Image (cartoon, rainbow, N blue to C red):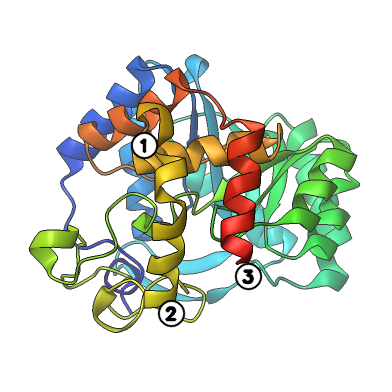
Amino acid sequence: MCLRDRLGWGAVDDDESIAAIRRALDLGITFFDTADVYGTGHSEHILGRALRGHRDEVVLATKWGNLFDEATRVADGHDATPGHARRALTASLRRLGTEYVDLYQLHISDGPLDAAAELRETCEELVREGLIRSYAWSTDDPERAAVFAGGEHCAAVQHTCNVLHDAPEMLELCAEHGLASVARSPLAMGLLARDPGAGADAETGWTRGAGDIRTVPPAWLSWFGAGGLPVPEQAARVAAVRDLLTSGGRTLAQGALAWLWARSPHTVPIPGIRSVAQAEENAGALRYGPLGESEMKEIAALLAA
């Protein structure tokens, strides 16, 4: 199945994407995360074009482990072998137009635990060869993350974390090993970026056209239901903490990022952007900094209730 149709966000405009990335760079954003399978290679091509001439100014992260055909744009299975790691990296470097990747991440969340040590050593070899600077596992399983954490050049774990989905065990592991917590889905795939209370497209702003992953959400996307509308229970949780997240003049998205920064000093949220306006809004969160301790306690109490 075409990955861009199955796991995408609908129609995209490459020029707008490049403009958004460059605007983010202008505003001080220096960490950019992608994966070889996003758009079956297209995302890496676009990011490489956008960052041309700015490579030394950014930290560039990508992922490997998913199999796909770039020509036919069809994704098919996984490969967590050392040989594929090297082949995938060679292809990613070509698409990104760079000689090295700063953070190389295994993209199979439930990948084989018994092979993790060998994959970690493969990543160490890639570091010694100068092809990558560091590595991580993109997983929500602390046991798997801990295996990679034992490597000298493991620098991070990428995992789900946001106001609606805390990850205390993973944050504790990051603190113990001095790793960055690269927070995937920091805006809950958009639920923490727009008003979830209304039902019509014109009122919510949700994109539910062909190709949007939220239209027929997979099992892991728990914030949305049939037709791409927010799950009522999740929408109610957002409504309960909205005033606290938007305190001090923040937008909802900025408040969600501020929650992550307050949650742990190790968090590095990676909110997605599709436009210059979204890049400016997300970067604008930096002006406010993390939420205060009292706000964090109130949010925790409301969500617990």
| Residue at point 66%, 34% (across, down) | 293
How crowded pointer 1 is (Cα within 10 Å; few <14, some 14-19, many 20+) is rated as many
Disc 3 marks a residue whose amino acid type is Asp
Side of 204 where 263 appears, left or right: right
| Image quarter of the N terminus | bottom left
x and y, in percent, of residue 81 in the image: 72, 65
| Residue at point 18%, 72% (across, down) | 199
x and y, in percent, of residue 88 in the image: 56, 54
Of residues 240 and 283, the one nearer the viewer is: 240
Disc 1 marks a residue whose amino acid type is Leu
**Looking at the rendered structure, which numbered label has been put on residue 79?**
3
Tell me whether circle 3 and circle 2 mark residues in contact (CB < 8 Å): no
Of residues 247 and 14, the one nearer the viewer is: 247
Q: Which residue is mark 1?
A: 47
Side of 227 where 78 appears, left or right: right
Side of 65 where 17 appears, left or right: left
- Which of pointers 1 and 3 indicates the residue nearer the eye? 1
- Which of pointers 3 and 2 indicates the residue nearer the eye? 2
How far apart are labels 1 and 3 at the CA level? 24 Å
Report if residue 298 is visible in the image: yes
Q: Which residue is mark 2?
A: 218
How far apart are labels 2 and 1 at the CA level? 26 Å
